[in-house]
Image (tube, rainbow, N blue to C red):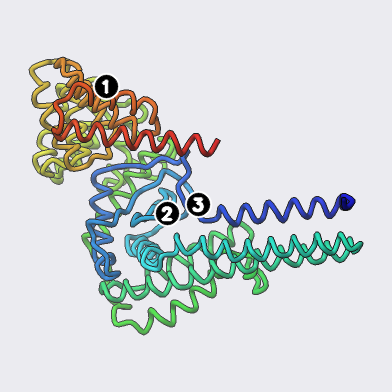
Amino acid sequence: MSRPIHFPAPLRRLARAAMWLSALLALALFSARPAMAQSILRDAETEELFKDMSAPLIEAAGLEPNNVDVVMVGDPSVNAFVAGGQVVYIHAGLIGEADNALQVQGVIAHELGHITGGHVIGIGQGAQAATNISILSLLLGVAAAAAGGGEAAMGVMAAGQQAAMGKFLAFTRGQESAADLAGAQYLSAAGMSGRGSIEFFQKLQQLEHRAGYFAKSEDTFYRTHPLSRDRIQTLEHVYMRDPAWDRPNNADIEARFRRVKAKLYGYLADPKDTLAHYPASDTSVPARYARAYAYHKEARVDMALKEVDALIATAPHDPYFLELRGQVLLEAGRPDESLASLREAVEITRFQPLIATMLGHALIATEDKDHYEEAERVLRASVARDRYNPTAWYLLGRIYDAQGDMPRARLASAEKQIMTGDPGAALQNAQAASASLPESTPDWLRANDIAMEARAQIEQRSKRR
């Protein structure tokens, strides 16, 4: 029997560090996924804008626009990412920092480059290669220690970990550079100028400088992304030669972006900050939009309605102004007064799911059972066009419950629970619905699908424990 090897304390710490590094590299595949604590912000106007902003770029990338989503994440940091599938996540902080829509379109083009390049899948390969180096250095270090060379072992392991990290970071920098060039290609093919992309990289560089960071060439080795100045130089060479470089921004898209940016600011910021940023002397549409949300957050209903009515006076049939008026009244406890505005907004947008959900909410909130039939109709239309709307399923469940239709009430609850991370309750409700619904009907089949999905989620959670 061989003697146990006793490593010096520094070597044991280094070994633990090596193993932790290996684990972190192996988990790098998941690093881009949105954290559970982050919330998805949904707004009908914003989603329509993102759709129109991204459609030409998605087509230029050879993808189907209906299969790619651009989603807002309620995070104040300036960031965007992809995390598997064909979804581009944009942080609210990025919208707040961007000066115009073209800058955001440059970001979307870059993220599409990650999708078409298969980078989320490929990052696992880069992590595995780096992990192999890390494990090999650990084994060589153990062998050296066993032979009595403690200092040599530490040197081997330290060099190995540095090589592993360097290989992985080089891999991610390569992906970012490839996405930069792919994004440039998509902007060009869509006939959009790369000015916005350059401007946004310059903005990122300014943010670094404001934070006290001034990049040096040797810093490249320690970064997941290329240096901002290097990216700017490379892309300037590409973009300034493109025929679209001097093409003006799309005026309609830019006007809509200013509205959405102000709306987001009013929704997220402290009302005092909003009212300082958009003073009463500013009577522009974006400023009124922001102030309406600020007043609404402070429960100053009359002031909020004054701003909204001023907006409606400029565009009487704008569905998003009408939606906001309905929202202010509904959340002020005046659902009966909200119905006219919300009905018109739903009609104009042809049953846009989020607006239809708000109308369904208002109809139920009136506590008038004569409205329940209409509420069921608009809510069913909402989930038919957008199944991933837990609020709509919750409200639909309330309608079914009030009507005494318990199987469909349980099914609606299961729909909500499976998408909000409660597979245990979803399984219970789906099984109860399946037992009472007529076999082979669409609702019965859906109940069984949810039950299967819930079991799979429960099994995955048990394995992680």
The image shows residue 191 at horizontal and vertical percentages of 26, 74
Is residue 193 found left or right of 24 in the rendered image?
A: left
Q: Which comes sooner in the sequence, label 3 or label 1? A: 3
SS class of the residue under badge 3? Answer: helix
User: Left or right: 10 with respect to 53?
Assistant: right
Task: Name the one closer to the observer, 138 or 240.
Answer: 138
Residue 295 pos. (x, y %): 33, 32
Instruction: State the separation of the CA atoms marked 1 and 2.
Output: 34 Å
| Left or right of 439, for residue 222 | right
Nearer the camera: disc 1 or disc 2: 1
Local crowd size for mark 2, using a 10 Å CA cut-off: few (<14), some (14–19), many (≥20): some
Question: Which mark is first along the chain, 2 or 1?
Answer: 2
Q: Amino acid at mark 1?
A: Ala
The correct choice, above or below, for 105 with respect to 389 in the image is below
- Whether residue 425 is situated above or below residue 264 in the rendered picture: above
* Residue furthest front as drawn: 1
Q: Is residue 465 left or right of residue 281?
A: right
Whichever of callouts 2 and 3 sits on the residue coming sooner in the sequence is 3
Instruction: Give the alpha-carbon distance from disc 2 to disc 3, as whole Å.
Output: 8 Å
Residue on which the image places disc 1 = 432
**In the rendering, at what x and y percent does residue 344 appear?**
10, 37
Numbered label attached to residue 83:
2
Which amino acid type is marked by label 3? Phe
Residue identifier under label 3: 30
Figure check: 34 above or below 37: below
Residue drawn at (22%, 22%), measured in percent from left and top? Answer: 435
Residue toward you, 440 or 386: 440
Say the numbered circle drawn on residue 445: none
SS for dot 2: loop
